[in-house]
Image (cartoon, rainbow, N blue to C red):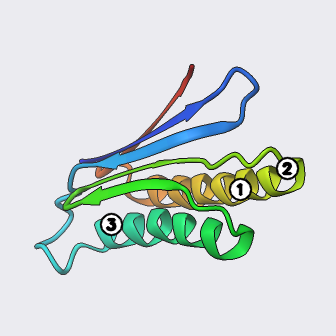
């Protein structure tokens, strides 16, 4: 199962997220659940960098991704980062709605 952990601050803003595990929906290389989750999460990190110019702190290994939302002190750019991350969550929830047996989304507040 793939576990997505979203950590929000007391203000409700996303601070960081992590993705771990393998869906095991199909054989490696044919697993559409893992591929979808990877595309959405890596795409969000790439979109933040390309569209806002801010670089998230991110680490990735096989079956694992961890990223922190960058904060530059400019409200407008920080809001853009949050919108991209919230969009990522909507996409992940869509995957979970269809393939809930293979993906779990957890949220926590720090």
| Percent of width and height locating residue 32 | 31, 74
Between disc 2 and disc 1, whose residue precedes?
2
In the rendered view, tell whether residue 51 sits above or below residue 69: below
Instruction: Tell me the CA gap for discs 2 and 1.
Output: 11 Å
Q: Distance between the residues labelled 3 and 2?
A: 36 Å
Q: Which residue is drawn at 40% across and 63% down?
A: 37
Residue drawn at (19%, 61%) of the image:
62
Instruction: Tell me the residue that label 3 is attached to.
Output: 33
Residue highlighted by disc 1: 81
- Vertical position of residue 104 compared to residue 10: above or below: below
Q: Could you say where residue 40 lies in the image, as x and y percent from the top left?
A: 49, 67
Numbered label attached to residue 74: 2
- Provide the secondary structure element on which disc 2 rests: loop
Cα separation, mark 1 vs mark 3, equals 25 Å
Counting residues from the N terminus, which is met first, the one under dot 3 or under dot 2?
3
Look at 23% across and 73% down and name the residue there: 31
Measured as percent of width and height from the top left, residue 18 is found at 40, 45
Q: Which residue lies furthest to the bottom in this view?
A: 30
As drawn, which residue projects farthest toward the front? Answer: 73
Q: Which of 109 and 105 is in front in this view?
A: 109
Residue at disc 3, secondary structure: helix
Q: Which residue is drawn at 72% across and 30% down?
A: 12
């Amino acid at each position: 199962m793939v576990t997505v952990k979203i950590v929000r601050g007391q203000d409700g803003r996303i601070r960081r997220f992590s993705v771990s595990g393998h869906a095991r929906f199909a054989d490696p290389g044919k697993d559409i659940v893992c591929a979808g989750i990877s595309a959405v999460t890596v795409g969000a990190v790439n979109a933040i960098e390309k569209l806002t110019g801010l670089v998230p702190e991110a680490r990735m290994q096989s079956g694992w991704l961890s990223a922190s939302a960058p904060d530059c002190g400019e409200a407008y750019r920080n809001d853009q980062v949050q919108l991209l991350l919230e969009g990522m969550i909507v996409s992940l929830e869509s995957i979970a709605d269809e393939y809930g047996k293979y993906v779990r989304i957890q949220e926590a507040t720090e």
